[in-house]
Amino acid sequence: MTAEAEKSWFGHPAGLTILFLTQTWEQFSYYGMRAIVVYYMVTDLMMSQAKSSMIFGVYVAFFYLTPMLGGVITDRWLGRRRAIILGGAIMALGHFLLTFEPFFYAGLAVIVVGNGFFLPAIPAQIGDLYQPGDPRHAGAYNIYYVGINIGGFLAPFVCGTLGELYGWHWGFGAAGVGMLAGLLLYILGGKYLPAEPVRQPAVKTARTRFSRRIILLMLAVGFATTLFRGAYQQVGNTVAIWLESGVDRGIGDLSIPMTWFQALNPLFVFALTPLLLGHWRRRAAAGRERPAIGRMALGAALVALSFAMLAALAAIAHGQPILWPWLVAFFAVLTLGELYILPTGLYLFDRLAPPGSSAFAIAAWYGTIFTGSLFSGWVGTAWSAMSPPAFFLLLAGCALAGAAILGLLGRSDHSRPESSAL
């Protein structure tokens, strides 16, 4: 590791800050587009709710499927830095294509391809910043997750406001500028990043280096996470549609823009992450640290609780809009559950990876978003056929089923060695 790569910023290797900021701007572009794309399809492209929900689900699904192939290409041939630069440039092009209505589907497809290279290579570099046994390693993923959500927090205010006031195409263009900003930061901060690992011979496949036991554990966790995401992914889909008419957004004579509510999730990530890390440190010091899969089970259960709360509120309202502070409470509980499951799953899959296969393992974790997003798109088509209380109760059931499976895995002897306390 070079002298620059060994420098410490804010108590962690300097490279973590570079990766943090790169991911911040990439997520600004992703969440900026996500905050407005359903509204764009319904209003400008005149699609039905069911069709727009399905397209949204398929897009997000393939957004997280291509990293499976991209992770293999990165580990075997391309290398992480070239993968990030190539993928980031392709994604920026896709966002700019969205500014032209005839290229809507082409823009989505180009973003999906670029993300296949970009996404697995960023978190795969985190592990190489730390020596084996470094106690800062596990917490680095929660810090990194905050970076993801800074971009997600800013995006609705910038892209969403531009889209609502001046036209959705301006929002898509702002997302493309954000992607270019992240790419530039990554290139300029390259000296602080770890050296490329030695790539394995191409004749070896990822599967032959993963033990059967680890593969089965990944598949089981992935299935449970798919059920969880069937509910969680609705935040940018049916929940976004519902809040336009199902939530009283008034403050006096003013009305809160509907896209701004998408910023609540990342806002609570900032607020809750330090508290949660402190809570986990205290539990560890007392010898009561919760295993990784146990944390994930608790997170899925909290997400189930958030949607059960939304179902109860919608039922009590009897078709009238609920007051917007209740939606804030929903996002607080939802985000707390998210913090228990998503960064933990990323860390778990990275730990399970054999040497030289971290990008593929990270991509496998993101592959659960592929299956979960397809599932969420399919579930979302039921929105028009169900009452809001019934639909939100269905989402609570999906998340609770995922929590039950993770809870069973956490108690099994097969999962304990791989999912020891973080």
Image: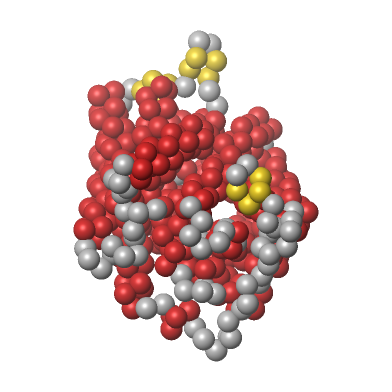
Q: Residue at x 48, y 17 (%)?
A: 250
Q: Residue at x 49, y 83 (%)?
A: 205
Q: Residue at x 47, y 38 (%)?
A: 273
Location of the N terminus (image quadrant): bottom right
Say if 75 sits above or below 167 in the image: below
Residue 294 in percent (x, y) is at 29, 52
> As rendered, which of 190 and 147 lies closer to the eye?
190
Say if 402 sits above or below 414 in the image: above
To which quarter of the image does residue 200 belong?
Answer: bottom right
- Taking 139 as reference, is 323 left or right? left
Residue 152 in percent (x, y) is at 56, 41
> As rendered, which of 44 and 339 lies closer to the eye?
339
Residue 130 visible within the image: yes
Looking at this rendering, what residue extends furthest in the bottom direction? 203
Q: Residue at x 38, y 49 (%)?
A: 341
Residue 358 in percent (x, y) is at 52, 68
